Amino acid sequence: METTKFDIADYLDSEEMIAEYLNTVLEDGNSSDLIVAIGHIAKSIGMTKIAEKTGMSRPSLYKALSDGAKPQFETIMKVLRAIGGQIHVKPMSA
């Protein structure tokens, strides 16, 4: 039996799934997890398409959204808009 490496990007095939994934990471993860998650979403949509929408090069996107990267907030916002996402703030419950 042949196995393949799991890639979450293969399962991010709808706006609802992408939103659920991103919200889960926002609730449970840290900033590094969020950057990697945005990278997974960009990969699922297509890095070329995201590069065109953000005005960034594909290599710059891969670098900015890789594990351990520390992209500028402006870069994160550009990519979020390109993937059709937005950030909402709600009060934390006690």
Image: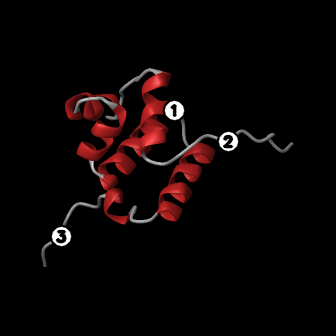
Q: Which residue is mark 2?
A: 88
Per the image, label 1 sits on a secondary structure element best described as helix
Q: Residues within 10 Å of mark 1 (few under 14, many from 20)?
A: few
SS assignment at label 2? loop
Mark toward the viewer: 2 or 3: 2
Q: Toward the viewer: 11 or 75?
A: 75
Please determine whether, in this image, residue 49 is positioned above or below residue 66. Answer: below
Residue at figure coordinates x 28%, y 38% from the top left: 52
Residue depicted at 32% across the width and 42% down the height = 50
Question: Seen in the image, is 36 located left or right of residue 87?
Answer: left
The local crowd at label 3, few if under 14, some if 14 to 19, many if 20 or more residues have their Cα within 10 Å, is few
Q: Earlier in the sequence, mark 3 or mark 1?
A: 3
The reply, left or right, for residue 23 in relation to residue 49 is right
Would you place residue 2 above or below residue 92 in this image? below
Which quarter of the rendering shows the N terminus?
bottom left
Give the labeled residue for mark 3: 3
Query: What's the residue type where badge 1 is placed?
Result: Ser
The image shows residue 57 at horizontal and vertical percentages of 23, 30
Tag 3: amino acid: Thr
Give how far apart the Cα atoms at labels 2 and 3 are: 39 Å
Q: Which residue is mark 1?
A: 31
**Front position in the image: 55 or 26:** 55
Residue drawn where x is 22% and y is 35% of the image: 58
Q: Position of residue 30 (x, y in %)?
A: 54, 36
Tell me the quadrant of the picture where the C terminus can be found.
top right
* Disc 3 from disc 1: Cα separation: 31 Å
Residue 33 seen anywhere in this rendered image of the structure: no
Under circle 3, the secondary element is loop
Residue at x 76% of width, y 42% of height: 90
Q: How is the image coloured?
A: secondary structure
